[in-house]
Amino acid sequence: MAYVAFLNTKGGSGKSTLATNLVTWLARSDGGIALVDYDPQESAMAWLRRRPKGLPSIHGVSGKTNEIRNVRLYRLTEGLGVRNVVIDTPAAIPPTQLIYFCRDADKLIVPVTPSQIDIDVCARLIRNLHVYGGVKRGDGRVAVVANRVRRETIAFRQLERFLAVLEIPLVATIRDSQVYVACAAGGLGIADLPDAARQREELAWSGLIDWIRR
Ligand SMILES: Nc1ncnc2c1ncn2[C@@H]1O[C@H](COP(=O)(O)OP(=O)(O)OP(=O)(O)O)[C@@H](O)[C@H]1O
Ligand SMILES: [Mg+2]
């Protein structure tokens, strides 16, 4: 079993977009996948309700019924027979509550968009993961995904420079594309798209998927 949580206290960095897409890749390749939504806005649960029938199935688990501090992540999907669990989390988690998401997660993924504000928040979050989240330096649990990237921009170069000094791997770079917006609206992920569209994004996602499996 692997528990993968998307975390960033900055709203709009792409937690729900990346979580819903990751589950489609894992549903396609491995099956037995659960998507746990800990955001009271329930964007991931709403996405799952829009998901067309006939596609690889994903178990949805709403965090609404169990406050995270009172529940261990491994209890949430007991009896579902799943192999991988992906957790979407809210923005603005107080630092002292990070521990509840970190304590049982095998992998913690921080999506960051190329902007100075996001870089600043990301730096603070990573410090808080160590100080409050119980994450040990060098334990290999934390990675960054650069999201909404337009490569030939000053903002992306700033992000690359920031990540180069962080001792956290950048495991994927996801482009800014309407394909993500369209997928979100249709209850789809990139992995559900026809071959050509899926293959266009496959390389970008492979780094993240390989890192999770490691
Ligand atoms: N790679 C992308 N390309 C284009 N649009 C994107 C991409 N990733 C995310 N978006 C859009 O950016 C917005 C914010 O993304 P998302 O909702 O996934 O962020 P979030 O971190 O879950 O936000 P919140 O903290 O509010 O839950 C959404 O409208 C989404 O469609
Ligand atoms: Mg979200």
Image: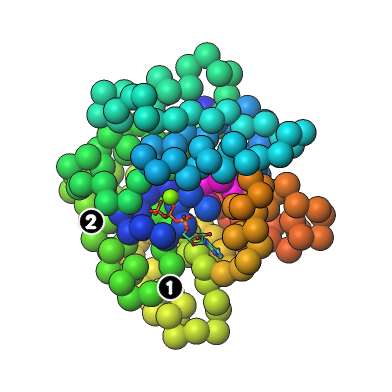
Image location of residue 172, percent across then percent down? 54, 60
Please give left or right for residue 201 compared with residue 21 in the image. Answer: right
Q: Between label 2 and label 1, give the one nearer the viewer.
A: 1
Mark 1 lies on residue: 114
Q: Magenta part of the protein: which range?
A: 18-23
Image location of residue 104, percent across then percent down? 35, 31
What kind of residue is marked 1? Answer: Pro
Vertical position of residue 59 compared to residue 136: above or below = above
Q: Residue 120 falls in which quadrant of the image?
A: bottom left
Please give left or right for residue 20 compared with residue 103 in the image. Answer: right
Vertical position of residue 5 compared to residue 30: above or below = below
First in sequence: mark 2 vs mark 1? 1
Image location of residue 26, percent across then percent down? 63, 39
Please give left or right for residue 136 compared with residue 38 in the image. Answer: left
Q: Residue 96 falls in which quadrant of the image?
A: top left
Question: Quick one: label 1, few (<14), some, or many (20+) residues within 10 Å?
Answer: many
* Distance Cα–Cα, label 2 vs label 1: 19 Å
Front residue of this view, candidates 100 and 176: 176
In the rendered image, the residue lying farthest to the top is: 79
Q: Residue 207 falls in which quadrant of the image?
A: bottom right
Q: Is mark 2 within 8 Å of ligand 1?
A: no
**Residue depicted at 82% across the width and 54% down the height:** 195
Q: Quadrant of the C terminus?
A: top right
Indicate yes or no whether the magenta region holds residue 47: no
What kind of residue is marked 2? Answer: Arg
Q: Secondary structure at mark 1?
A: loop
Front residue of this view, candidates 170 and 153: 153
